[in-house]
Image (cartoon, rainbow, N blue to C red):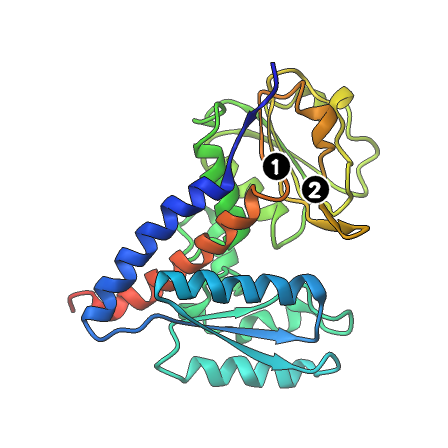
Amino acid sequence: MPAQRIDGRSLATELRAELAARSSALRERGIHPRLLITLVGKDESSVAYVRNLQRTGAHAGIDVFIDELPFDATASAVRARLERAAADASIHGVMLQQPLPEHLSIRSIADAIPVDKDVDGTHPTNQGHLAFGSGSEFVPATPAAVMLLLQRSPAWPLAGRRAVMVGRSVVVGLPVAMLMLAQDATVTVLHKESRDLQPFVRMAEVLVVATGVPGLITGDMITPGVTIIDVGTTIVEGVLKGDVDFASVASVAGALTPVPGGVGPVTNVALLRNVIKAAGRLAAPR
């Protein structure tokens, strides 16, 4: 049987309706949710992502502004922009778009993101809460989207399941691994320095892939019935490709996210949910 398609677009539609209702309630109280995205350079994928966030935000009643810096901006210049946003009471969420140009290190900048506006969970404090399982205020958007999609999959709940995370980036791989651990999955993390993906991939009941290597996972590598979340997005000859070879995997897996139409649409909404959460503090009883 072909794999169940885990449809991110339909889930995102449901979540957007919830966002719009919550945003409307805040606006009635005079609170206009606002997100500021600091964008360094003109990376094609990043520009497309933030423009899409603007469109999604407009439909949900969330104002999304882009603060553009040149590709050669220094770390101190980026930090200054983030610190300025921290002092602006009209801004509820702040995000530093990644990837950054090669001359910039996220480790040298992340602590300048205001921790109470850090809607993509990048500040070391929020990363630390996530690592300690102590309730990060803001779960990073893409990992949050992965978990929302897993909740709609046959693999949920994850307790006791063998889960494999391919990729260890601080943006996706490590947070997803920690979130799956928090759900009591047995988690193995693989990465580019791993000697081999096997036998781990074949043992997986849940497989999350975030490497940026198109077609890395093929149907002959997996066990029938596995649930796969494909986070990869690479443009190949003008076509968006995932890390999973969809054609060969779809006839073996039990459930699978497509690219496009899987993680991407839910990521946008997950980020904007954090903006609403941040803005909602102003409406909370004191």
Quadrant housing residue 213: top right
Residue 179 visible in the picture: no
Q: Secondary structure at mark 1?
A: loop
Q: Do tag 1 and tag 2 residues touch (Cβ < 8 Å)? A: yes
Type of residue at label 2? Gly
Q: Secondary structure at mark 2?
A: loop
Quadrant housing residue 67: bottom right
Query: Residue at 18% of width from left, 71% of height from top?
Result: 29
x and y, in percent, of residue 232 in the image? 68, 45
Work out which quarter of the rendered image holds the N terminus and state it. top right
Relative placement, left or right, of 136 versus 204 is left
Label 2, residues with CA under 10 Å away: few <14, some 14-19, many ≥20: many
Query: Which residue is disc 1 drawn over?
Result: 258
Query: Which residue is disc 2 drawn over?
Result: 242
The tag on residue 114 is: none
Task: Compare residues 144 and 219 and report the one nearer the observer.
Answer: 219
- Asked if 3 appears above or below 24 in the picture, the reply is above
Query: Residue at 43% of width from left, 41% of height from top?
Result: 11
The total number of labels drawn is 2
Type of residue at label 1? Pro
Relative placement, left or right, of 200 versus 12 is right
Task: Compare residues 116 and 251 and report the one nearer the observer.
Answer: 251
Work out which quarter of the rendered image holds the C terminus and state it. bottom left
Q: Tell me how far mark 1 sits from mark 2, CA to CA.
A: 8 Å
- Asked if 7 appears above or below 75 in the picture, the reply is above
Label 1, residues with CA under 10 Å away: few <14, some 14-19, many ≥20: many
The answer to which of marks 1 and 2 sits earlier in the sequence is: 2
x and y, in percent, of residue 131 in the image? 52, 49
x and y, in percent, of residue 279 in the image? 32, 68
Residue 257 visible in the picture: yes
Query: Residue at 48% of width from left, 51% of height from top?
Result: 130
Relative placement, left or right, of 8 versus 68 is left
